[in-house]
């Protein structure tokens, strides 16, 4: 009887050891791919900026010279890059700068996900005007 009991204990121990070794040998592999900002499933529009007001939540953009400007809303997640892929500040946007806008329509708004400028920021001309007034009095 003791031999039978000992054989059962040995068989159960062997089965447990086999099951636990198989469970411990399993590995899980997770592959993640960083593709950067995605433009899959977005609509594109190529043209130039019509207006941009710092601190606002949208800019206007026109696809052709005679076309009526359309409002595109941007968020904190909106990425603006130059042709080389370098991130550009939104404050560097000027009227008539050519670009391609990637957006998704949400209700009646077009939410911009990415803007790719066609010209590098260094080539964008920033115009400043200085006015000097001179007053002379006659004796």
Image: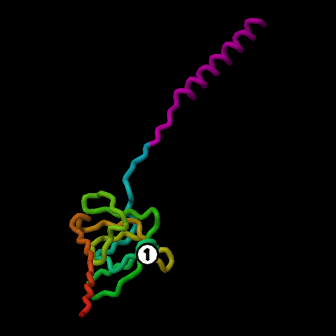
Q: Residue at x 45, y 71 (%)?
A: 55
Out of 98 and 45, give the one closest to the viewer: 98
26 vs 98: above or below = above
Out of 96 and 136, give the one closest to the viewer: 136
Residue at the outermost right position: 1
Residue at the outermost top position: 2
Residue 69 at x, y = what percent? Answer: 35, 84
Q: Residue at x 33, y 70 (%)?
A: 93
Q: Let me know if residue 81 is in the magenta part.
A: no
Residue count near mark 1 (Cα–Cα under 10 Å), binned few <14, some 14–19, many ≥20 = some
On the image, which quarter does residue 70 sit in?
bottom left
Residue at the outermost front position: 139
Residue at the outermost left position: 123
Disc 1 element:
strand
Residue 63 at x, y = what percent? Answer: 30, 80
Q: Residue at x 26, y 72 (%)?
A: 126
Q: Residue at x 33, y 75 (%)?
A: 45
On the image, which quarter does residue 115 sit in?
bottom left
Taking 11 as reference, is 98 left or right? left
Q: How many marks?
A: 1
Q: Let me know if residue 7 is in the magenta part.
A: yes
On the image, which quarter does residue 102 sit in?
bottom left
Q: Main SS of the magenta segment?
A: helix
Give the residue at mark 1. Answer: 58
Residue 127 at x, y = what percent? Answer: 25, 75
The quarter in which the N terminus is drawn is: top right
Residue 56 at x, y = what percent? Answer: 45, 74
Identify the magenta region.
1-30
Out of 125 and 42, give the one closest to the viewer: 125
């Amino acid at each position: 009887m003791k031999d039978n009991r000992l054989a059962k204990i040995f068989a159960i121990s062997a089965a447990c050891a086999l099951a636990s070794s198989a469970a411990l040998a399993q590995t899980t592999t997770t592959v993640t791919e960083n593709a950067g900002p995605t433009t899959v499933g977005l609509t594109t529009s190529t043209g130039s900026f019509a207006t941009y007001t710092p601190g606002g939540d949208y800019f206007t953009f026109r696809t052709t010279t005679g076309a009526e400007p359309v409002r595109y809303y941007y968020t904190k997640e909106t990425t603006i890059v130059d042709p080389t892929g370098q991130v550009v500040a939104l404050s560097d946007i000027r009227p008539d700068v050519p670009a391609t806008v990637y957006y998704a329509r949400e209700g009646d708004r077009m939410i911009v996900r990415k803007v790719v400028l066609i010209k590098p920021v260094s080539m964008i001309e920033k115009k400043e005007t200085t006015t000097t007034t001179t007053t002379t009095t006659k004796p």
